[in-house]
Image (spheres, grey):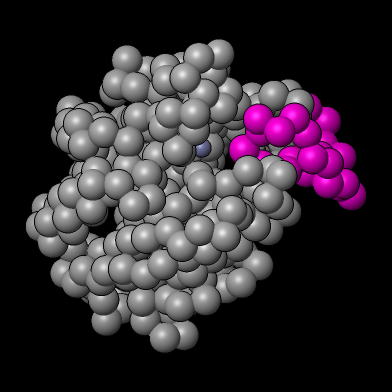
Amino acid sequence: MFFRRLLLPSLLVGILLSSCKDGEQKKSDTPASTAEAQIKTPTFEADSAYNAVAAQVAFGPRTPGSDAQKKCAAWMQQQLKQVCDTVYVQNVNVTGGDKKQLPCINLIGSINPKAQRRILLLTHWDSRPWADNDSKDRDKPVLAADDGGSGVGVLIEVARQVKKMGLSPELGIDILFTDVEDYGKDVWGEDSYCLGTQYWAKNPHVAGYKAEFGILLDMVGGRGAQFLLEGLSRQYADGVQQMVWQAAGHAGFSSFFPYTEGPAIIDDHDPLNKLTGIKTIDIININADPRSPFPAHWHTHNDNMQIIDKATLKAVGQTLLQVIYESAANKAV
Ligand SMILES: [Zn+2]
């Protein structure tokens, strides 16, 4: 049972409050002696992910219509070409909550594109055009090192490691870098967020695209990050969420992935679950306070390279590699 409540206008999203007990310990980690823990996985190199975050931030804020948007998209396309088998680019316009036509560049990199079994990994890469949670320069865009850059940095490094080690031809990976997530305002309605994902969900890069499950990354590089069990993910894809948290335990990163129920966040996984039926969870740095679930640097000018911690990038990237290679070893879920 849950209800929807819109909060302060500065909040990214409408928040759903579920009837969970905050802080409830749902399940302890599976002991590291299980078969899953024995699976051979590549070593995620946090330095490489960190450099990929810094490269994006160096373009400046990647807001819709900016030069930085075009340059960063070209850079990401080049990166994906090096680590994926096929790269797709969706260069379209979407309509903002202010009715403006916004250039939107979604990029998709596919590993083993012919495989029937697929895992979708996604993150938004755009920068919020307003630092509306800051006390100064609120009308200026944020650098979005964490809220934009971190997910891309992690996924490029994950793909690089998968390419290096190789992956069973039965299993394919699709990496979706989705644009224009953060050009939203609560006053324009919750549909004003996640515009690139809404477009992709209606126009996937391959007609009739399906995946066994999806994992969204959002703010996965911040110092001291905690990835609570986000509420919409629990609602839509509880089994996927439990599987990913167990994989985090197998990889040795339970301290970043506690079994603590967090509030529900409307994020890119929401349109995916609703429009495509792909069971998708959100790995997002949140706390258990439903009135203020986001870290202090969120939508402020402090979302810069200073906040990025290699230990956080490592925890998320190594967990994803664990998920991928456990999935390759297991039958379809
Ligand atoms: Zn944001």
Task: Place residue 49 in its image quadrant.
Answer: top left
Q: Residue at x 42, y 17 (%)?
A: 302
Residue 296 lies left or right of residue 57; in this view the side is: right
Residue 320 lies left or right of residue 15; in this view the side is: left
Q: Looking at the picture, tell me which residue is in the foreground, 128 or 1.
A: 128
Where residue 258 appears, as percent x and y from the top left, is 58, 28
Q: Is residue 146 visible?
A: no
Query: Taking 57 as reference, is 3 above or below it?
Result: below
Task: Place residue 117 in its image quadrant.
Answer: bottom left
Q: Residue at x 23, y 53 (%)?
A: 70
Residue 225 lies left or right of residue 144; in this view the side is: right
Q: Which residues are magenta?
A: 1-26
Q: Is residue 134 visible?
A: yes
Where residue 162 appears, as percent x and y from the top left, is 21, 54
Q: Looking at the picture, tell me which residue is in the foreground, 8 or 164.
A: 8
Query: Taking 79 as reference, is 218 above or below it?
Result: above
Query: Taking 151 as reference, is 259 above or below it?
Result: above
Where residue 36 appears, as percent x and y from the top left, is 41, 48
- Any magenta on residue 5? yes
- Spot the residue most to the bottom: 207
Q: Residue at x 31, y 68 (%)?
A: 91
Q: Looking at the picture, tell me which residue is in the foreground, 318 or 306.
A: 306
